[in-house]
Amino acid sequence: MPSDLRDPRHPAAPPGGRRRTGPPMSQDPHLARRRVEITNAYGLHLRPAEKFVGLAGRFVAEVRVRHEGREFNGKSILDLMSLAAECGTWLEVEALGPDAEAAVAALAELVAARFGEEANPAPCPPPATDPGPAGGLRP
């Protein structure tokens, strides 16, 4: 780490010794969001997550993905993999920054195109039913 980042007395370092690279995201007036449905048969597995993160990384905007009250970093493959979003899952994609609208539009298009994975898409399988206690086995 450069010494100017550790030494708060250095003239290039602000008080506290940390540099700021721009205004806090909370002060940025540019916000866009859109709901998207995961419709590829295997859901948001590694390859689609990698494509999503790669595309999100092309934008300056902070990208977040929300699902069931939880928020995930849209530029982190580990965060997206932890979603475990199966086919039929609805997500909210949100971007905050100067190119937020473009980011959300591009990401929504990627999701709608099933991440470019399936030439002949199959419909999402029906949701699994709860087998009950002991996996549905009866004595």
Image (cartoon, rainbow, N blue to C red):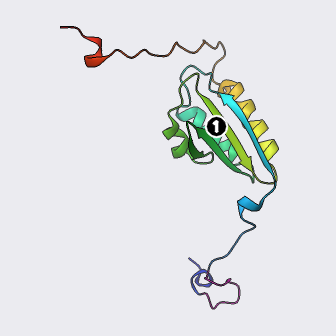
Residue 74: x percent and y percent? 63, 45
In the image: residue 101, left or right of residue 70 = right
| Residue at the spot 68% in from the left edge and 39% down from the top edge | 93
Q: Which residue is mark 1?
A: 51
**86 lies above or below 62:** above
Residue 17: x percent and y percent? 61, 82
Q: Quadrant of residue 138?
A: top left
Q: Quadrant of residue 60?
A: bottom right
Q: Quadrant of the N terminus?
A: bottom right
**20 lies above or below 46:** below
| Residue at the spot 45% in from the left edge and 16% down from the top edge | 128
In the image: residue 139, left or right of residue 37 = left
In the image: residue 118, left or right of residue 137 = right
Residue 9: x percent and y percent? 63, 91
Residue 46: x percent and y percent? 53, 35
Circle 1: residue type:
Lys
Which span is picked out in magenta?
8-17
| Residue 23 belongs to the span the image colors magenta | no
